[in-house]
Image: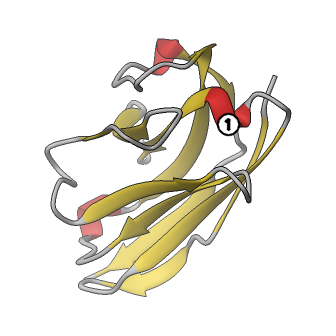
């Protein structure tokens, strides 16, 4: 199983950028698709982005496509979420997740992810 620790959240203004990091431990990271999800107060958790085990395939929610970029470094066992042109509606707790199956191309569905980090708060002021 993969253990995950997110970092990089904070308070920024609309239009600013942030980069979230998710450090993973465990031997299976390099063969595991990863994802980022977020949950705003009073709302359900929603998909943000995912990346395949080898980084060749990525997917994004419509609300962040063109502004956010997911990437991974399989040497550093870390997945990143670069967030540009942030909007107040991006305010949420952001969670990193590892897919249940190895060698998958990624997924939009939270049920396909079996390991989760503790989350990092991102607050965007207008």
Is residue 43 at all visible to an observer of this figure? Answer: no
Q: Quadrant of the N terminus?
A: top right
Quadrant housing residue 125: bottom left
Left or right of 48 on screen, residue 31: right
> Percent x, y for residue 15?
24, 85
Q: Quadrant of the C terminus?
A: bottom left
Which residue is at 41% across, 68% downward? 82
Is residue 106 at all visible to an observer of this figure? Answer: yes
> Percent x, y for residue 35?
48, 37
Which residue is at 61% across, 63% downward? 21
> As displayed, is residue 94 above or below residue 80?
above
> As displayed, is residue 87 above or below residue 101?
below
Name the residue that disc number 1 marks: 30
Local crowd size for mark 1, using a 10 Å CA cut-off: few (<14), some (14–19), many (≥20): many
Which structural element holds mark 1?
helix
Quadrant housing residue 102: top right
> As displayed, is residue 82 above or below residue 47?
below
């Amino acid at each position: 199983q993969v253990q995950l620790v997110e970092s990089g959240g904070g308070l920024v203004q609309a239009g600013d950028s942030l980069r979230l990091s998710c450090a993973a431990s465990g031997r299976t990271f390099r063969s595991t698709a990863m994802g980022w999800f977020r949950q705003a107060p009073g709302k359900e958790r929603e998909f943000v982005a995912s990346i395949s085990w080898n980084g060749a395939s990525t997917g994004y929610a419509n609300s962040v496509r063109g502004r956010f970029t997911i990437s991974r470094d399989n040497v550093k066992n870390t997945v990143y979420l670069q967030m540009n042109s942030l909007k107040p509606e991006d305010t949420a707790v952001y969670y990193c997740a590892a897919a249940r199956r190895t060698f998958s191309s990624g997924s939009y569905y939270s049920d396909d992810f079996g390991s989760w980090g503790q989350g990092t708060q991102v607050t965007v002021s207008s």
